[in-house]
Image: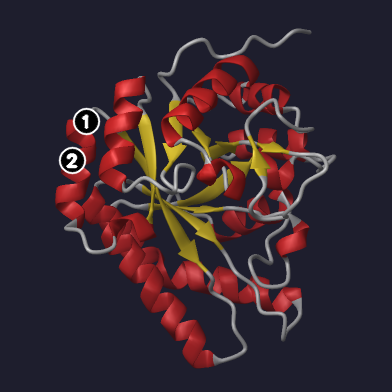
Amino acid sequence: MSIAPYTDLSRLCIHTITTKPWDIETAARRYAAAGVKGITVWRDALEGRDIRQTGNMLRNEGLSIVSLCRGGFFPATDKNKRKLAIDDNRKAIEEAAALGTSLIVLVCGADPAQNLEDSRKQIQEGIETVLPEAAATGVKLAIEPLHPMYADTRSAINTLAQANDMAEAIHSPWVGVAVDVYHLWWDPALEQEIKRCGENDHLFAFHVCDWKSPTTDMLLDRGLMGEGCIPVRQICSWVEATGFTGFNEVEIFSTQYWKEDQPVFLEKIIKAYKEHT
């Protein structure tokens, strides 16, 4: 069965980290001029700015503010570090509300000094601790499973099944999952677990890029859609089948692309989006 690609940009969102050399004002202006309709803001892009004014600026450019990245990093063997993480996630919730977005993506964290089960327990406890603030401000929390290569320090949640399990255990309309093809394309249970997201109505975000082969860096060598080995369009079809109507978010960490002329890179993103998602 052939899967039709997207032919317009009405559901295209780009993360500010994707065009890292641009400040948020430049990114907003350039995205909007190119016909992009959504933006996900990384917290570093807000440094030194009035967050409410920045949110207004983005909306005035005609952009939907899809989410804020990132919260999380809950686990630690040190109790004081866990408290600092809770405080930072509460701050992130305040920032999201001020910015005018209803979603925070959680990179959940891990501590290599303890086993993964303890880290996962602390992740769930951390989310549950900040849940009252999230609900009070109308900000949802999306658990993002990361590739197992990041299980030491970045996330003890490494499969979509684990993220689904945790979201279901917390059982709140304010907690769901984010699916990123870069982290999950390898999983033989991916189609089944995406379907499970839909059945439980907690698929909150969908991120796209590609896995270059060979890759030169496990963090900073992501590719444009169609440039690697991920069946991006097929995974898009599984997400569509759940009834998901949110944005398709382009999130690319790439030292190569950050060195390129960014207007040209933006053109490449749009071309790849139209042809390969």
The disc label shown at residue 61, or none: 1
Which residue in the structure is indicated by mark 2? 57
Q: Nearer the viewer, residue 82 or 267?
A: 267
- Residue 201 seen in render: no
Task: Say left or right for 134 vs 176.
Answer: left
Image x and y of residue 246, in percent: 46, 30
Element class at badge 2: helix
Residue at coordinates 61% horizontally, 15% vertically from top-left? 275
Q: Decide: marks 1, 2 in contact (CB < 8 A)? A: yes
Amino acid type, label 1 = Glu
Q: Nearer the viewer, residue 233 or 266?
A: 266
Residue at coordinates 50% horizontally, 83% vertically from top-left? 82
Amino acid type, label 2 = Met
- In this rendering, the answer to whether 138 lies above or below 206 is below
Image x and y of residue 18, in percent: 49, 43
- In this rendering, the answer to whether 110 lies above or below 189 is below
Q: Nearer the viewer, residue 84 or 231?
A: 231
